[in-house]
Amino acid sequence: MKKKSILVLGAGRSSSALIKYLLAHAEGGNWHVTVGDFNVRAAEERIKGSQNGTAIRFNIEEAQSCGEVVASSDVVISLLPADFHHKVAGLCLAYGKHLFNASYVSEKMQSFDKEAKEKGLLFMNECGLDPGIDHMSAMEIIEGIKTKGGKVLSFESFTGGLIAPETDVDNPWRYKFTWNPRNVVMAGHGTAKFIQENQYKFISYQQLFSRTTPVHIPDYGNFEGYANRDSLKYMDTYGLRGVKTLLRGTLRNEGFCPAWNILVQLGCTDDSYMMENVGTMTHRDFINTFLPYDDKEMVEGKLLARFGLDGAGPEMLRLKWSGFFDTELVGLTAGTPAQVLEHILNKRWKLAPQDKDMVVMWHRFVYQLGGKAHEIQSHIIMQGDDAVDTAMAKGVGLPLGIAAKLFLEGKISQRGVCIPVSKELYGPLLEELKSLGIHASEVERALL
């Protein structure tokens, strides 16, 4: 029997677990894995000389060579930045190939639904960690509530990629970059929309990090969550039309958001213009550019006055630890504020080889059954092995790999642009994740 061909596009930090999984199952699944990346050496490092894998150079902007690579594949898994998925989808439509990715469904991607269905193609999106495992674990609980006759009244869900408790213990942010740093810096742009106790709520970017939700997880401590951009669109997806509360968000360790909010309020996350004098700019200069002119006051004093901070408080501690008051050169010749911020943070927030990250996912449901209210709290904790085999890579890559395997085994009947909320997919996928050590801990109690 001819081997199937799986094409993985992107060999970056989220790809390690996916590629390792696909190679491990290549013999049993009768497939060959091709990994394409602009940096062919990165692809080679992921393949590690496996006879079931091939590394190639891939540039999405080179249309002809891209088309040839896609045409020779059966399934394409895209780990490219989300902005490129529609280009990959266009190639998959042109050559009749199935597509999997872990990113949110964009309007452009959704526009491919009709043609994909007509051609019998599956374009599976949001099949990673968040979005992905969050959808599937939520749907399993929602369906369980409905099966016993209950009605969901409230659903809150937060997920965060953090660092393990034993990693970099002096880091006051309790955070490092475990996925695309640019996405972290740009997170939250736009207005967050959700419903809370039957009232629609909207939080602008300028307010987002000062309006957080406290979350406590037994044995792991206190966290804070900020709202994602659009929770409302998942009402129909989850079958929760009429729910009183629906809020999806991002989780951070307690104290992160107040400090990050200072950078937001200053304008450090703005990506709309290029800064002057970046080539000679120090970290300290960068912060000072956003503060009023005062030749008699130091940068620290200006910050204290601007935000009413305590000089020895947690916000200033985090900013100082990050090097924002240092006289070190930024190290770029040009950049937007967001690009400069990312570059400065990457000096402290880049995972060291021995660092371990941690993914925390938390759901809270309130449902009614027999005239009584009940609460379910569910959480998933994943911990990485090191800076390469991260929890984030496992959370993003394993669902994609399992979904592709299930599809090639003929166990997914869906076609068109989909996300993993059907029991046909989330049932066996969650079951396999459980066998790999990724499973939810759940506590239920009656509410008075």
Image (tube, rainbow, N blue to C red):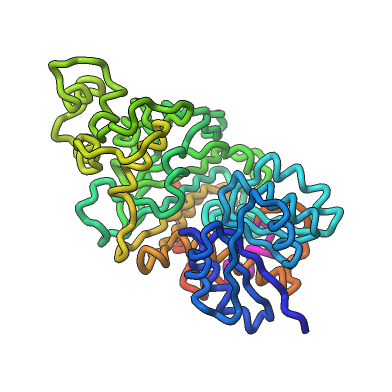
Tell me: residue 348, above or below residue 358: above
Tell me: residue 172, above or below residue 9: above
Point out residue 124 in the picture as x, y percentages from the top left corner.
68, 56
Could you say which quadrant of the image residue 287 lies in?
top left
Point out residue 343 in the picture as x, y percentages from the top left corner.
35, 42
Tell me: residue 196, above or below residue 96: above
Q: Residue at x 35, y 39 (%)?
A: 332
- Look at the image and tell me in which quarter the N terminus lies: bottom right
Residue 71 is covered by the magenta coloring: no
Q: Residue at x 47, y 62 (%)?
A: 393
Instruction: Name the foreground residue: 341 vs 184.
Output: 341
Point out residue 424 in the picture as x, y percentages from the top left corner.
70, 65
Task: Specify whether 285 is left or right of 350.
Answer: left
Task: Specify whether 120 is left or right of 256.
Answer: right
Q: Predominant secondary structure in magenta?
A: helix
Point out residue 185 in the picture as x, y percentages from the top left corner.
42, 40
For residue 141, say whether it is visible. Answer: no
Which region of the structure is painted magenta? Answer: 420-431
Task: Specify whether 127 is left or right of 2.
Answer: left
Tell me: residue 260, above or below residue 393: above
* Residue found farthest to the right: 118
Could you say which quadrant of the image residue 9 lies in?
bottom right
Instruction: Name the foreground residue: 116 vs 181.
Output: 181
How many numbered dots are placed on residues in this image? Answer: 0
For residue 353, say whether it is visible. Answer: yes
